[in-house]
Image (spheres, grey):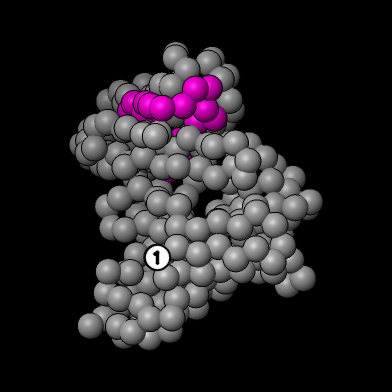
Amino acid sequence: GNSVTQMEGPVTLSEEAFLTINCTYTATGYPSLFWYVQYPGEGLQLLLKATKADDKGSNKGFEATYRKETTSFHLEKGSVQVSDSAVYFCALSGGSGYSTLTFGKGTMLLVSP
Amino acid sequence: SQTIHQWPATLVQPVGSPLSLECTVEGTSNPNLYWYRQAAGRGLQLLFYSVGIGQISSEVPQNLSASRPQDRQFILSSKKLLLSDSGFYLCAWRRDRPYEQYFGPGTRLTVT
């Protein structure tokens, strides 16, 4: 079946530091890949997505590239802000299951001023 | 544009009491709908999903149930709450390809 593995957190950074959150996946077929962000006490928001190999999703300074050869979708941002502190979830759909999303366990990011 | 609502936003209930959480979606028709639970400090657990009125798939056997009485309404229920039912409950709807889901604001349930 499908699975998503994320790096465990929390990831602690200073403001303006470079961010990478690793995500690797296992799926049959050609899944679509997503990053969601969850701010404290809120629901999940779709941050970015990529639907095929070599696609780059981007939003709000965050980027992730769909790497089929390494089955990865790492999230990056060149300069984080305190307001980026949140939990980030990597997810996939398609592959062997189109009705549901498969989520990683989430990575907490803490950015200090 | 599409909007998803959940209520109540917070709920404190005693053990053994019933539960009803409601989710409604606006601006789309015949969406796939989902209920998730998020325990404190944990990831997302898919509880139920529905592809149409009256069609419910259960992912985790437990004392919760779900119903879909109308196209854009999804209800999560329990006859008798357990302490372990405490958590943050999220409803979501799914867009067609590439199948991303959009989440509601959530309901924080505390069972005492």
Residue A46 visible in the displayed image = yes
Q: Nearer the viewer, residue B49 or B1?
A: B1
Residue that carries the numbered disc 1 in the rendered image: A60
Q: Amino acid at mark 1?
A: Lys
How far from the left and from the top, in percent, is residue B78?
38, 25
- In percent of the image, x 69 and y 42: which residue is there? A97
- In percent of the image, x 49 and y 46: which residue is there? B45
Crowding at label 1, few (<14), some or many (≥20) Cα neighbours within 10 Å?
few
- Asked whether A14 falls inside the magenta stretch, the response is no
Position of A39 relative to B1 (above/below): below
How far from the left and from the top, in percent, is residue B82?
35, 35
Residue A1 visible in the displayed image = no
How far from the left and from the top, in percent, is residue A61?
42, 70
Q: Nearer the viewer, residue B106 or B11?
A: B106
The image quarter in which residue B112 lies = top left
Residue segment shown in magenta: B21-37
- Asked whether B30 falls inside the magenta stretch, the response is yes
**Which residue lies most toward the front here?**
B1
- In percent of the image, x 50 and y 64: which residue is there? A58
The image quarter in which residue A34 lies = bottom right
The image quarter in which residue B1 lies = top left
Position of A52 relative to B31 (above/below): below
Position of A17 relative to A100 (above/below): below
Position of B77 relative to A48 (above/below): above
Residue B67 is left or right of residue B96, and the answer is left
Q: Chain of mark 1?
A: A
Most common SS among magenta residues: strand
